[in-house]
Image: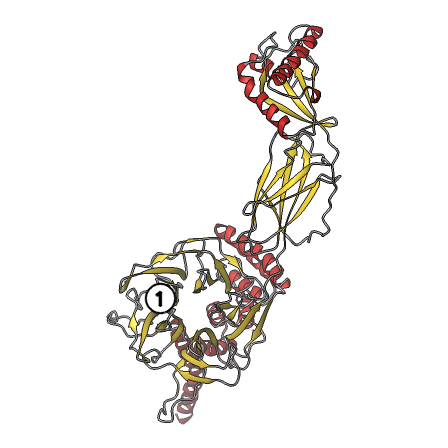
Amino acid sequence: MKIKRLLLILSCAGAIIYLVPFTLFSDDLGKANKYYEKYDYKYAMEIYQQVMEKNPTVEVAEKLANCYRFTSNSIEAEKAYATVLTFPGFNPINYIYYADALKENGKFEQAKRNYLTYAERVPAQSDEAVKLANGCDAARIWLENPNLNIQVTNESGFNTKYSDFSPIPYEKGFIFVSDREFLKPLTDKRSPKIYGWTGNPYLKLYQAETKDSVFTGEMKLTLMPEQINDNYHSGPATLSADGNTLYFTKAGVTTVEEKPKGKDVVFKKAIFYSTKQNGTWTQAVSFPYNRPFEYSIEHPALSPDGNILYFASDMPGTMGGLDIFYSEKLGSGWSKPKNCGSAVNTKYDEVFPTVRKDGKLFFSSRGHITIGGLDIFSAIGSKDSWTEAENLKAPINSSKDDFGIYYFNDNLTGFLSSNRPGGKGGDDIYQFSERPKEMFFAVEGQVVQKQDGSPIEGVRVFLVDKDTGLEKSLVSDENGAFKFELAPETDYLVRGDLDKYFNRQQGQITTKGATESTVYNVKFEVEKGEEAYLVRLNNIYYDFNKFNIRKDAEADLQKVLNFMKTTPNVNIELRSHTDARGKATYNMELSKKRAISAENYLLKAGADKERLTANGYGETQLLNKCADGVKCTAAEHQLNRRTEFKVVKVDPVITYVPGYTLNPIFPLITGTQ
């Protein structure tokens, strides 16, 4: 009996020993999932790591990988998503997440393959996936070919092992955001609250007073007052032009709205503002469109005149994720927010807007073509009307997250924030400076025959400054080419030689507003017959079997007369033709009479006889198929009854070949002709 009791006890003990680890494991996983649902990713990932060692599943693998992604740890995210792809039944979206991590780590070819794999697995999303794959090629090129005129320097004397970002000038220094551990007043014995997403203290707004425009170890650092910093997150911020109104992001805020009953709600972000009165900041006031239980409003940015507030939000009306919205000042209030439109926003996140003093918008995006994570873009316009977003490329952007840009008044220097390699903490503040560009402008072109595109030498081309009327000229070389250097911020007219051509060709070119060195390209096409330039007059037609000048031909003949008066150094040959009807010998005589008829008209009008010749060519130079025996309409036959004039070729007075070499990196832009 005692033996049976002993065996029963041992059996129960063994069951307890077997079941307890499983029970503890289940409790740990449930705890991790609660952390995950509350965005406490730092705490969740620590448990998921342990669970993956004991009992790995695709669900835990995906959540662990997501924790790394949400905390911007692309190195670990790459490893974790690679593990996810080894499980059967994983969600194909993990190909995208894996590719994103690879791209952030500079592995563009591997990223491209995984984007394309997703396109194969999810055909409905193939267009977007192929776009992402193709973007890897641009990303690699941008990263490998940085703008050497821009220097980016880590403000190492200022940054910490924590996140420091989004500085804006204020008084004798700057206001910026940081989650650093800060020395509290001696009377404050409380430990700083920890944010479960990062495992660091909550973000706060700090004021730094410095001796110059850079951060050094010698500065006075103070925490912004309680009216601005509360128990949760504060920042980033934007200031009014007079420095007396501060708009900033807050999270976990308390508003007049009541928390929905029966719901465990995680507070979203909201915008508040405070004004300085008698040197003291007032209690922060909520932006009227905050709905922290429904959606986020964050990252405020004021227009230079303070009348437009731009911000990021996932409110109704977003194209996906966070979009840039704007609200206009209406007296003491603000208009209902509107989306800034598809030129700026995508179905992914657009965040951290800022508006430069000249009104140019800068923001960060994941949805446009990027080098890696968030890239900084620019656009010109206002409200919901913008030019296409432009990637600032390297070195402003890296393969990691780049955001929080601020330009100083010179529009060439400023700050940006990034978690790129080489920093001291999660996010660091960098100063950038751009050397003024030594821009080069020129126009190059070619004169060619319209018929076959062959070059024409000796054509004089004029460059006219439209503002001053100053005129330059040169002649085309043996390749029909010509080149002029251009001045910046100038409107020009480029035209062909009116001394040789009756048909006028010209191009409008402007360097005003150009921000890149540019060579403008124009092409002049002229008609040439044998050794002369041939011009067909539009309306010198004749009635059947007639050689008298019709009334409708007088206008074009008057143009020939005007041309002869303005170009005294060339001779004109009048060339008349017939259609193919009738005998060839008769048509030859008729064409001569038509040429002489045109010549007599010009002589009576005052033309110089020594500069005119008249020849007939009968039916030997038809313009269409209407030869003998071919049935044609009256209009087709009339096309052949015409008079042309050709300008005898004039030898060039000078030959000019510009003494510079075209830089192959300059873009060629087609000008008007």
274 relative to 100, above or below = below
Any part of residue 578 in sight: no
> Where residue 220 sits in the image (x, y, percent)?
45, 85
- Front residue of 497/424: it is 497
Quarter of the image where one finds residue 255: bottom left
> Where residue 640 sits in the image (x, y, percent)?
63, 16
Q: Is residue 193 left or right of residue 78?
A: left
Q: Amino acid at mark 1?
A: Ser
Quarter of the image that includes the N terminus: bottom left
Any part of residue 297 in sight: yes
Residue beneath the point at 31% across and 65% down: 294
| Number of marks | 1
> Where residue 223 sits in the image (x, y, percent)?
40, 83
Quarter of the image that includes the C terminus: top right
Quarter of the image where one finds residue 330: bottom left
Q: Is residue 177 left or right of residue 559?
A: left
